[in-house]
Image (cartoon, helix red, strand yellow):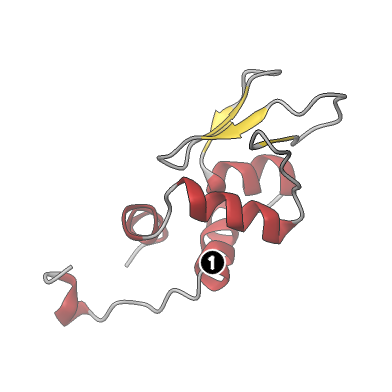
């Protein structure tokens, strides 16, 4: 399975908005009562995670998924970001013979 296929599978099976928020909290982001956080230096948090897991920074216009966030703001490669998320979610690789069942 390529890294891109692995990322797609993780997004499809595991990454909804709640899981992305949990991952971001695990990384160290703090969310306010309204569900906003900051990914850059700013007075008022302007980042929101949508129900589908997309992260949107209303202050700068940046948007992306958890993999984009790890690459852009934490200096990881795409492969490193996918592996980080897989380990954080405790995702076990799916054997080839089971892929058709999922």
Q: Position of residue 8 (x, y in %)?
A: 35, 53
Number of labels in the image equals: 1
Locate residue 42: give its quadrant. Answer: top right
Q: Is disc 1 surrounded by few (<14), some (14 to 19) or many (20+) residues within 10 Å? A: some
Q: Position of residue 7 (x, y in %)?
A: 41, 56
Locate residue 56: give its quadrant. Answer: top right
Q: Residue at x 71, y 18 (%)?
A: 59
User: SS at mark 1?
Assistant: helix
Is 52 positioned to the left or the right of 60 in the image? left
Is 97 positioned to the left or the right of 14 in the image? left
Query: Where does the N terminus fall, quadrant-wise?
Result: bottom left
Residue to which mark 1 is pinned? 83
Q: Residue at x 40, y 40 (%)?
A: 52
In the image as oriented, which residue stretches furthest toward the front?
33
Q: Position of residue 81 (x, y in %)?
A: 58, 57
Query: Where does the C terminus fall, quadrant-wise?
Result: bottom left
Q: Position of residue 68 (x, y in %)?
A: 57, 42
Q: Residue at x 66, y 33 (%)?
A: 34
Front in this rendered view, residue 35 or 96: 35
Give the answer, above or below, for where 53 lies relative to 100: above
């Amino acid at each position: 399975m390529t890294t891109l296929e692995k990322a797609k599978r993780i997004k499809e099976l595991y990454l909804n908005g709640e899981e992305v928020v949990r991952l971001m909290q695990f990384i160290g982001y703090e969310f306010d009562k309204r569900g906003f956080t900051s990914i850059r230096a700013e007075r008022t948090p302007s980042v929101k995670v949508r129900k589908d897991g997309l992260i949107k920074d209303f202050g700068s216009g940046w948007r992306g998924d958890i993999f984009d966030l790890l690459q852009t703001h934490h200096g990881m490669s795409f492969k490193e970001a996918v592996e980080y998320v897989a380990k954080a979610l405790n995702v076990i690789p799916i054997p080839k013979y089971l892929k058709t069942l999922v």
